[in-house]
Amino acid sequence: MGEQEPRSAAELLDIVDGQDRVVGQATRAEAYARRLTHRCVFVLARTGDGRLFVHRRTAQKLVFPSRYDMFVGGVVGAGETYDDAALREAEEELGVSGLPAPRPLFTFLYETAEHSWFSALYEVRCDGPVDPQVEEVAWHAFLTEDEIAERLPEWDWVPDGLEAWHRHQAWRAQTG
């Protein structure tokens, strides 16, 4: 994974309307600056015993630097599918290859005064050792859901990941 070029503010993204239909393209920097709705993926990386990959983002990240997250993921590139982005982002951020295709769970629109993106939430099994990207991940561990719950009020979490986490918990309670 180390030989891949890191994604940047110049990366081209599909811009979408309120129904998640592509209406244009813009760079990541322009999408963030103008609050243009684009696409993102959130992937829960879970071990066979149920532990989840949790990490603290690096201080150099464009959005939510130095905050904790229980998802790997990121923006969907122009012309890329959610499914392809989920696998790419999971392998890049975890520093592994050969993961199974992440399982899609649900989608939602994340909107704040500063940000707007359609979000697809996935889950993937990751039992092997990980070697996270140093450009993306400053610290990591595999935690149980109870350990995450204990840290929710203590750690500074990325707001979109926190919303995705709460939506995931509600979705799981409804679907069993």
Image (cartoon, rainbow, N blue to C red):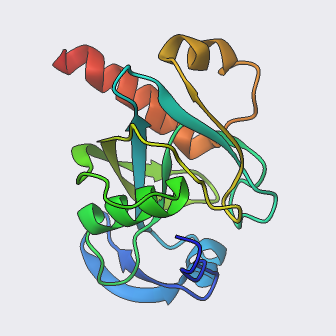
Residue at x 30% of width, y 77% of height: 80
Q: Quadrant of residue 172?
A: top left
Residue 129 at what x, y percent from top left? Answer: 50, 43
Q: How many marks?
A: 0
Q: Is residue 162 visible?
A: no
As drawn, is 163 to the left or to the right of 58?
Answer: left
* Residue at the limit of the structure toward the left, as seen here: 175
Q: Of 18 and 164, which appears nearest the observer?
A: 164
Residue at x 29% of width, y 83% of height: 79
Residue at x 53% of width, y 58% of height: 93
Residue 69 at what x, y percent from top left? Answer: 60, 40
Residue 21 at what x, y percent from top left? Answer: 24, 73
Quarter occupied by the C terminus: top left
* Residue at the limit of the structure toward the right, as seen here: 59
Q: Of 72 and 159, which appears nearest the observer?
A: 72
Residue at x 54% of width, y 80% of height: 4
Q: Is residue 138 visible?
A: yes
Q: Of 106 and 147, which appears nearest the observer?
A: 147
Residue 150 at what x, y percent from top left? Answer: 65, 12
Against 71, residue 32 (above or below) is: below
As drawn, is 6 to the left or to the right of 97?
Answer: right
Against 52, residue 24 (above or below) is: below
As drawn, is 23 to the left or to the right of 69?
Answer: left
Against 131, residue 18 (above or below) is: below
